[in-house]
Image (cartoon, rainbow, N blue to C red):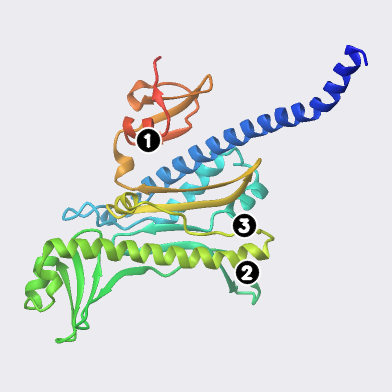
Amino acid sequence: MRIINWALVFVIIVSPVFFKNYWRGIEQERTQEKIILYDGALRTAVQDAAFSLRLNEDQNMEVRYDSTKKIRANKERAVEAFYETLFNNVDIRDDEVAQGVLKRYIPVLAIVDYDGLWIYTNDTFTNKEGEKENRQVWKSKMPFSYADNQGNSLSFTLDNYVYAYDAQQKQWFEGKREDVASQVNHKISLLNDPELFDQVRRTTIINVIQKNLEHYINAYNVYARNLGITYRFTLPSVDQEEWNNTINDVGILSFIQGVPVGLNYYNNYALGGSRLVKQSVIYGYLRDGIKVYFRESDHYSGVIVEKFSSEHEAALAGYFPGKK
């Protein structure tokens, strides 16, 4: 067989493998671009939503002088800001069908309020016309509750303000930890130890958040199956440091799971604190395919991909200091 014939045989055998790998590489590139897009969109949406938590029409409901954490969370405006920013950043602001599809992959939004947890998720109910309807609604606020072995109950907040039920006196008391301890004659032992009190308070709040998120994400699977979504939604693993950051201030948590992106599924979550976003902003951009960041004061013009509260946070996300 002549060399030309061997060459043709080689091309015939190798070509399918070559083109298969070539197109797979192209698809992987597109997938990665889509993931970067969703990462930036989710992070920015949560930050805008967290900022909106503090926007109140009634100035009397703004931050109290005695605690920077005691605010009335504007949860409705936060949800509006979240979806508005998310849809804008994935370029579906004018596509209601695409918006509805993307919402299906967001099982819950959670607002960590000063004295309890709000969950925004899908629920089925009977409307005024007597028809079954399914849409996203607010669940009742879940307090950060704890009970000791003596039958006393405590409802914690994001600081040392506490609501306590004295089982002996059959009476509720409220105030700062040390004041309530005096009111109950120091009979509730947890109130007498500030270090233990803070430890139990944090653990209780995180447990309330985790248990409720897990419950409502699992419940969402029933709704998702009715829509033909075979992906199983679960509470992702969140490290302890991030949980601790979540309960430092009023904030918002969002989860996106199961979004088809090329060869993979997009799964991510984002946490945003209302006080955090009031710090100086660092903007992340894509310049010539490279992730760079600039300070807000740099007034760099370009399409903002992500927002950060510090240069360190931007660097952790893979951004480099930009030069004009």
Residue 137 visible? The answer is no
The residue sitting at 25% across, 59% down in the picture is 158
Nearest to N terminus: mark 1 or mark 3 = 3
The one nearer the camera, 168 or 57, is: 168
Query: Which numbered disc, 1 or 3, marks the residue closer to the eye?
Result: 3
> Residue at 6% across / 73% down in the picture?
182
Callout 3 secondary element:
loop
Q: Earlier in the sequence, mark 1 or mark 2?
A: 2
Where residue 102 appears, x then y in whole percent? 60, 50
Q: The residue under label 2 is which amino acid type? A: Glu
Q: CA distance from mark 2 to mark 3?
A: 23 Å
The residue where tag 1 is placed is: 308
Q: Quadrant of the N terminus?
A: top right
Quadrant in the rendering for residue 18: top right
Secondary element under disc 1, as helix, strand or loop, is strand
Across and down, in percent, residue 145 comes to 29, 72
Per the image, the residue denoted by label 3 is 231
Looking at numbered disc 3 in the image, what kind of residue is underneath it? Tyr
Asked if the residue at tag 3 contacts the one at tag 2, i.e. Cβ–Cβ closer than 8 Å, the answer is no
